[in-house]
Amino acid sequence: MQNPVTHAQAVLRHDWTETEVIELFNAPLNDLVFRSQTLSRQYFDPNNIQLSALLNIKTGGCPEDCAYCPQSARYETEVKAGPLMDIVEVKQAAMEAKQHGASRFCMGAAWRSPKDSDLDKVVDMVKAVKDLGLETCATLGMLNDDQALRLKQAGLDYYNHNLDSSPEFYTEIISTRTYEDRLKTLQAVRSAGMNVCCGGIIGMGETLIDRACMLIILANMPKHPESVPINLLVKVNGTPLEHNADPDPFEVVRMIAVTRIMMPASYVRLSAGRTEMSDEAQALCFLAGANSIFYGEKLLTTDNPGLIHDQKLLDRLGLKPTH
Ligand code: SAM
Ligand code: DTB
Ligand code: SF4
């Protein structure tokens, strides 16, 4: 049964300060989660979860040096570079994702930014996936205004482009493009009229202030991103961050709760890293306000909990997929 939204909706804020966000991060967990869950209920059915399927349409060989990423050509990982996938295979994967209950299909490419000839092919893929009745999302690297418009015209609903961390910490993780470049792409996506999917990663060695700064930049934008993915670093052999220390699972819960409080009307996705989390820690994240996950056997190149595991978990928690 659908729970009607019964509460008055809180006003969306765009004036968050570092002091108050740090205070949120440090609040007693019960207080923090009570607040985030209460806000969540003002905007969403607490027993619904949005399921996105992910497909890597272009694997590896990326010229960028993102220290977390197994697809960078600069690191010796098990990922081998491949060509852009054929549209027939993409359509097949999207049909399967739909059959399994996903409502959104996200296509990822290991590019710094798409070449125009590549974009022609992605445009056709977006149209084909849209025709199946799925919401469409893509993450292809940096876009200029024309490219963003072309994707919008093809029927792309969401564009994923993460800030990953604070501007200060970003420079320790990526040297081949700037934070400003990322913000420009987000602006192009907004101007083209697409929904913005933008979040970050925790577990890269960043401080609480870095996490707070990233969320402040997102929440203080004129419009909150409609979707905010929170990734727990997947430590991949061969990447510079392979030996990083794992954050305490409660830090992930806190990150989700603070994101929910600052952007209460946005989907907050518990993204990469669920394979390393217990079912109980994931359930706490849902309680704290996460209401979206990647659903399927694989993320881009790394494992995700399989469909059977996730279906069982959602059943145990009484969570129903949104359509
Ligand atoms: N190449 C494009 C770009 O960087 O925008 C699109 C694909 S890229 C893999 C999408 C996002 O995946 C990154 O911005 C990062 O947030 C996330 N990601 C990549 N590797 C990760 C890892 N090992 N653990 C967690 N998140 C990761
Ligand atoms: C996002 O924030 N997380 C997804 C998606 N956007 C594209 C990617 C996670 C990638 C994890 C590492 C991998 O599988 O290669
Ligand atoms: Fe390339 Fe994206 Fe990986 Fe960075 S995160 S190396 S841009 S695929």
Image: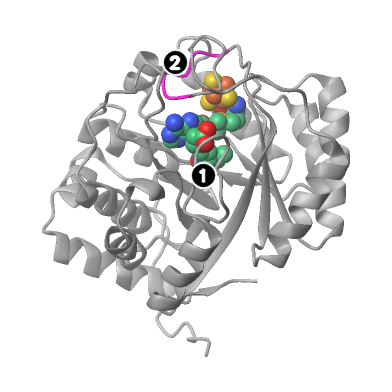
Q: Position of residue 293 (x, y in %)?
A: 50, 56
Q: Is residue 266 left or right of residue 39?
A: right
Q: Position of residue 320 (x, y in %)?
A: 52, 76
Label 2 crowd bin: few (<14), some (14–19), many (20+), radius 10 Å: some
Q: Is residue 53 left or right of residue 284?
A: right
Q: Residue at x 78, y 27 (%)?
A: 84
Residue position for label 2: 174
Amino acid type at mark 1: Pro
| Residue 136 sits above or below residue 303 on the image | below
Q: Could you tell me which residue is drawn at 56 percent across and 45 percent down?
A: 298
Residue on which the image places disc 1: 222
For the residue with label 2, is its CB less than 8 Å from the closest atom of ligand 3?
A: yes
263 or 285, which is in the foreground? Answer: 285
Left or right of 270 in this view: 298: right
Q: Does residue 210 lie above or below 2 as drawn?
A: above
Q: Residue furthest left?
A: 28
Tell me, what colour scheme is on the image? Answer: one colour
Residue labelled 1 has its Cβ within 8 Å of some atom of ligand 2: no
Three-letter code, disc 2: Ile
The mark lying in front, picked from 2 and 1, is 2
Tell me, yes or no, if residue 88 can be seen here. yes
Q: Quadrant of residue 68?
A: top left
Taking the spot 28% from the left edge, 23% from the top edge, the residue there is: 243
* Highlighted range, magenta: 64-69
The rendered magenta stretch, by its main secondary structure, is classed as: loop
Res 266 seen here: no
Label 1, residues with CA under 10 Å away: few <14, some 14-19, many ≥20: few
Q: Earlier in the sequence, mark 2 or mark 1?
A: 2
